[in-house]
Image: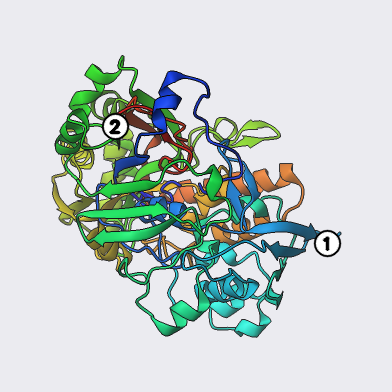
Amino acid sequence: MKKAFASIFALLLLVSAVLTGCGSKGTSGDGAAKNIKQEITLNAMSEPPSLDPALASDTTSGWIIDHLFEGLYTKNQKGEPVLGAASDVKVSEDGKTYTFTIRDDAKWSDGDPVTAQDFEYAWKRVLDPKTGSPFAFYMYYIKGAEEYNKGKGSADQVGIKALDDKTLQVELKAPLSYFDKLLTMWTFYPVKKSLVESNPKWAAEAKGYVSNGAYQLTEWKHNSEVVIEKNQHYWNKDTINMEKVTWKMVNDATTYYQMYKTGELDLIATLPTDAVAQEKNNKEYKVVPYFGTYMFMFNVAKEPFNNAKIRRAFAMAIDRKAIVENITKSGEKPAYAFVPYGADTPDGDFREVGGAYFEENVKEAKKLLQEGMKEEGWSTLPEVTLIYNTAENHKKIAEAVQEMLKRNLGVKIKLANQEWKTYLETTEQSNFQMARMGWIGIFVDPTVILDYYLGDSPNNRTNWVNKQFDDLMAKAKVEQDDKKRYELLHEAEKVLMTDMPFIPVYFYSQNYLTSPKFKGIVYPVNRYPDVRWAKKIAE
């Protein structure tokens, strides 16, 4: 997605607290901080499409939700999974049954206790076909979950059961070594059963919204700002430094850059390209790896991208090095595969082991284009429109790709842009030929990247379905031998990259400017910054 959970998610795409704040102690700055309002203003760039954990599929929504809710597991400042709303977990000898104890002091923001029934209800709500959750497939590791979600089983057959108010039992189809990491994802957050049942639109406005994490939603001016404030009923509230967080929704990069410079914003991401060079030596400038891939999706059900040779021709005609060096300029790496760098395997980094699946070659691209057109009986290539969500950098990249395709292939494409929420709806309906997207792993593992192109993934908007790919992914998810698991994932990626229902452009990195008035902000590799432990040390 930009975000996606485009861009997601991924984004793409870390929550709650067990450790204390990071601010240094005994300094004059911290002494002064006692009288400083602990408030920070961020920029979401656009309206979050949904603040319902069951429906959110993008990193904008996820960024806010991660501050509002807490799952059975959460992440500490190092990005490690630790127990959150659960105080204890017991795992059966065969590794398939997890029994969680919900904290006695786990409460909703309205003061009511969080129960095991809330978790059971929330997870089964995600799986309920009527809910239409785009991330329901992340629960398919659970016994009976896939069958229920696909209308082939009942809720009672799903391996999620509240044994009593404080005990939740979860049965998996097979042992899963990264189950604790998976449970830090917002899709697995609880929702208050009585609230959601009584008000289907509970997550549409700040009034009546209830959460169980470090913050509660206090204001939501649609398309303008979201405000959250410290949840006084949160069991771990004493570790939360930041009292109030405001997200503005300013999409224009030049505008939000100026707002940062004038102090209206305390932190911004994705600097305007023209500003990167002048800010690189600024102590406030920061670049962090981001476990995700920037790409252009093809709708393989629409001409001309129903032809694999034409898809590959487009991919081979784009100069990625020029894009990352002249447009994005933040240390991104050109992408010739889907899974980014950063996932360790027994044989080394997954991307380094897998290598590149194609190379830029204009001569070969022209040949493939002509062969593809001949196969389809076309003397002229059908008209192509590339769509992207409104943002300066996306526009510049789209314009560069437009020029490259014209120069290298003699193909003229049109460009069109839409606001983020509308854009997600357009692509979800497969109402496009070629579209910008980004995918961020919910944690650092090739599986969560490759899952994007599963045939039954709601996030796969390309109409590309490949049984061999799906079968390899299914085998990898139950394979207990780590080395074999990664081999299966490499095979799956090879199938994907052979058909190429998308163009990988680059592997993300993320740039930020952060006010020196703040310390203790966490910059995860698959989410936007976590500010729960941030501390304002100066006005």
Query: Are circles 2 and 1 on residues that touch, CB within 8 Å?
Result: no
Q: Position of residue 251 (x, y in %)?
A: 19, 45
Question: Secondary structure beneath disc 1?
Answer: loop
Instruction: From the top left corner, tell me how far across and down residue 102 is, in percent.
Output: 67, 64
10 Å neighbourhood of mark 1: few (<14), some, or many (≥20)?
Answer: few
Q: Of 468 and 23, which appears nearest the observer?
A: 23
**Figure check: 89 above or below 397:** below
Identify residue for label 1: 92
Write the residue at 46% across / 53% down.
Answer: 66
Q: Earlier in the sequence, mark 2 or mark 1?
A: 1
Please give the name of the residue rendered at 61% of the width and 82% of the height, measured from the top-left corner: 155
Residue 297, given in percent of the width and then of the height, sits at 33, 52
Q: Amino acid at mark 2?
A: Lys
Near-viewer residue (31 or 435): 31
Where residue 512 sits in the image (x, y, percent)?
A: 33, 31
Q: Is residue 263 visible?
A: yes
Quadrant the C terminus occupies: top left
Secondary structure at badge 2 equals helix
Real-space Cα distance between discs 2 and 1?
58 Å
Colouring style = rainbow
Total marks placed: 2
Residue at the spot 48% in from the left edge and 50% down from the top edge: 496
Q: Is residue 1 left or right of residue 191?
A: left
Nearer the camera: disc 2 or disc 1: 1
Res 393 → quadrant: top left
Amino acid under disc 1 = Ser
Please tell me the numbered disc located at residue 363.
2
In the picture, measured across the screen, residue 40 lies left or right of residue 397, that is right
